[in-house]
Amino acid sequence: MQLLASGDQQNLQWQRDLSIILEKRGDTFQLLNQLSEAESCFTRSHEIRQQLVDANADDLGLKLELSSSFDRLGNISAAQYHLDEALVDYRKSLSIRQKYATPYPDDASWQADLAFSFEHIGDVLCAQRNPNEALSEFRNAFAIRKKLADASPEDAERQARVAHLCLRIAQAMDKSKSTEEEATRLVKQGRSILEALSKKNALSALQREDLTELQRLAADLAKPDTPTAE
């Protein structure tokens, strides 16, 4: 495919297919923790997609794939603790998704991608010790995730995404010394969702980790404040 695509750079489908192959190869390298190789694949895939978007400005599908490329570049940068670079890429992805998701509030795919962008930015801001800014991003993501979950109450993944954001908001609030009342409510909400899914054996490993962390936070929030010594 790479040979074919190199020989005919005007063939949109071949170029698009090559970008997908490179992206999947990058995903495999990332799973193997071979971050340099993954970054090389993602960068090349991104370059192809940017060229395709530049030449086909009205193709919405290409723009969606370009936003995915920015996400993957952001993921690699975040994994290497290059947080400023990750934030730039995540915000570029968000810019694309906001532009095209906002006019289509009922398109679940666009909305889910938009929520991911807000979450990614919030995660980086937390890592940069900016919990107040992170809270805003997490709340934006939560509003989208809650709407998607309410539309499909039997969708375990959508419900678990809400629980994950309950956790992330509560964690950010804890760091910014926000009110305990809301943090307690969110932790209870997240636990309720994941414990119900756990009874159905519907939790992934990462979701089980979320449940463990929610249970730990609940215990911490339930502890009485230690009186300050005079």
Image (cartoon, grey):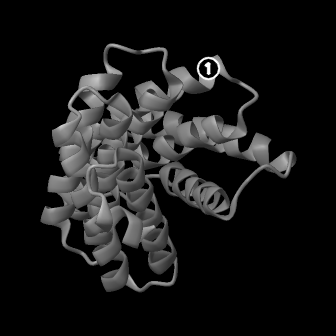
**Image quadrant for the C terminus?**
bottom left
Residue type at mark 1: give it: Asp
Give the secondary structure at mark 1. helix
Q: Is residue 179 visible?
A: no
Foreground: 86 or 228? 86
Foreground: 186 or 168? 168
Residue at horizontal 37 percent and vertical 34 percent from the top: 114
Residue 80 percent coordinates (x, y): 27, 78
* Farthest residue, direction right: 200
Label count reads 1
Q: Is residue 148 visible?
A: yes
Whether residue 197 sits left or right of residue 76 in the image: it is right
Residue designated by label 1? 150
Residue at horizontal 19 percent and vertical 72 percent from the top: 82
Whether residue 68 sits left or right of residue 112 in the image: it is left
Residue at horizontal 40 percent and vertical 43 percent from the top: 116
Residue 158 percent coordinates (x, y): 61, 35
Say if 166 sits above or below 44 in the image: above
Say if 158 sits above or below 103 in the image: below
Residue 85 placement: quadrant: bottom left
* Farthest residue, direction front: 7
Say if 103 sits above or below 69 in the image: above
